[in-house]
Image (cartoon, rainbow, N blue to C red):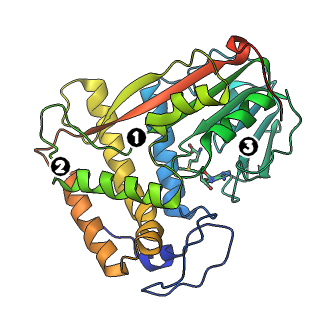
């Protein structure tokens, strides 16, 4: 079901006020984040959060981080604050989407992660990022910043989803709406200059930035409850709800502003996607990558 406020979602959460109408004609503001931060999308993030903790066996991250730590996290700060009660936890985002009730060891800052960071070098014991796909233009530069702001021996932990729907049994063919979705948003990422393929590309960019011996942990995340394995069936059901909740917000501003689709074209595409996501013949999944790394494995750190 389309949300009753679908038209409001032509206006993304980016910091700039951009005039909109049904067939928006201006140039997209490629600097702004083109995802909404409204209630519907925040619910999607909550569903994603539950789904990722199921995926990681109840953990917040894979890095074996000491409980006595400082953290820079994006949004997940409340859980980190509970898990690491002695830590000073800082959450950052482009826009104020943070909950109002948080533990005392949490602070929030509106920060653009692609600008010069306001924290001192060698400051954090842990930097955690999740689902920043489509948000960063220069990933090697971002990873250099992460490196320079970690203490020696500190950890970086990143989780990213692939947007490539696929199947192992050929049930998601190239002309399936899920494949069309993947191709469409991959193209948008390239046009924007902010890739949606960071899950696939992260290891290479991290190495380019100076991380050594990067380990990738790859998980299959089914779409829907088609898998006979109980854990994967459960995950798939959550992921179906996650995608159904997310697609309108993921698509609306990007398709109208970057590909110049009309509002009605987007609504038709979304209706086809809703059918495709529940296609009982499609054994679809996409991959999720987690990259935990300690900079104790880095020989020299360049701070600049
Ligand atoms: C898909 S959400 C993921 C949120 C959170 N990391 C999580 O996993 O629940 C992406 C978030 O990144 C934020 N974002 C996008 N570009 C950013 C930037 N340049 N600096 C900081 N945050 C950014 C968006 O505002 C949005 O809240």
Q: Is residue 14 above or below residue 125?
A: below
Label 2 environment density (alpha carbons within 10 Å; few <14, some 14–19, many ≥20) = few
Q: CA distance from mark 3 to mark 2?
A: 40 Å
Residue 259 appears in which quarter of the rendering? bottom left
Q: Position of residue 64 (x, y in %)?
A: 63, 14
Q: Earlier in the sequence, mark 1 or mark 2?
A: 1
Which numbered mark, 1 or 2, is in the foreground of this view? 2
Q: Which residue position is annotated with label 2?
A: 174
Quick check: is the Cβ at mark 3 less than 8 Å away from ligand 1? no
Q: Position of residue 232 (x, y in %)?
A: 29, 28
Q: CA distance from mark 1 to mark 2?
A: 17 Å
Contact (Cβ within 8 Å) of mark 1 with mark 2: no
Q: CA distance from mark 1 to mark 3?
A: 24 Å
Tell me the tag on residue 266.
Answer: none
Give the residue drawn at x 15%, y 50%. Answer: 279
Residue 220 appears in which quarter of the rendering? top left
Report helix, strand or loop for mark 3: strand
State the quadrant of the C terminus.
Answer: top right
Q: Position of residue 178 (x, y in %)?
A: 24, 52
Give the residue drawn at x 36%, y 76%. Answer: 261
Q: Is residue 290 above or below residue 240?
A: above
Q: Which residue position is annotated with label 1?
A: 162
Q: Earlier in the sequence, mark 3 or mark 2?
A: 3
Instruction: Specify whether residue 58 is in view.
Output: yes
Tell me the tag on residue 91.
Answer: 3
> In the image as oriented, which residue stretches furthest toward the right?
120
Contact (Cβ within 8 Å) of mark 3 with mark 2: no
Give the residue drawn at x 22%, y 64%. Answer: 272
Q: Position of residue 202 (x, y in %)?
A: 52, 33
Report helix, strand or loop for mark 2: loop
Report helix, strand or loop for mark 1: loop
State the quadrant of the N terminus.
Answer: bottom left
């Amino acid at each position: 079901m389309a949300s009753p406020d679908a038209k409001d979602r032509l206006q993304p959460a980016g910091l700039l006020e951009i005039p909109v109408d049904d067939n928006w004609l201006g140039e997209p503001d490629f600097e702004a984040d083109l995802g909404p931060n409204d209630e519907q999308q925040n619910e999607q993030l909550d569903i994603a959060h539950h789904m990722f903790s199921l995926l990681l066996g109840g953990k917040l991250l894979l890095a074996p981080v000491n409980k006595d730590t400082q953290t820079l996290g994006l949004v997940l700060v409340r859980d980190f604050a509970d898990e690491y009660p002695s830590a000073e936890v800082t959450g950052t985002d482009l826009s104020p989407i943070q909950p109002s009730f948080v533990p005392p060891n949490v602070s929030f800052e509106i920060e653009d992660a692609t600008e010069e960071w306001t924290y001192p070098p060698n400051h954090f014991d842990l930097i955690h990022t999740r689902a920043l796909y489509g948000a960063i233009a220069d990933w090697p530069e971002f990873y250099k910043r992460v490196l320079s702001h970690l203490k020696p021996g500190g950890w970086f932990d990143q989780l990213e989803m692939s947007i490539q729907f696929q199947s192992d049994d050929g049930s998601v063919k190239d002309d399936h709406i899920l494949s069309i979705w993947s191709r469409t948003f991959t193209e948008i990422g390239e046009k924007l200059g902010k890739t949606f393929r960071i899950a696939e590309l992260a290891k290479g960019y991290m190495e380019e930035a100076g991380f050594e011996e990067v380990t990738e942990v790859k998980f299959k995340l089914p779409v829907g409850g088609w898998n006979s394995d109980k854990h994967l069936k459960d995950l798939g059901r959550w992921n179906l709800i996650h995608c159904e909740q997310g697609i309108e917000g993921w698509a609306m501003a990007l398709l109208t502003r970057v590909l110049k689709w009309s509002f009605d074209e987007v609504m038709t595409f979304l209706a086809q996607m809703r059918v495709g996501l529940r296609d009982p013949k499609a054994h679809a999944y996409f991959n999720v990558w987690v990259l935990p790394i300690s900079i104790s494995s880095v020989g020299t750190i360049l701070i600049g």
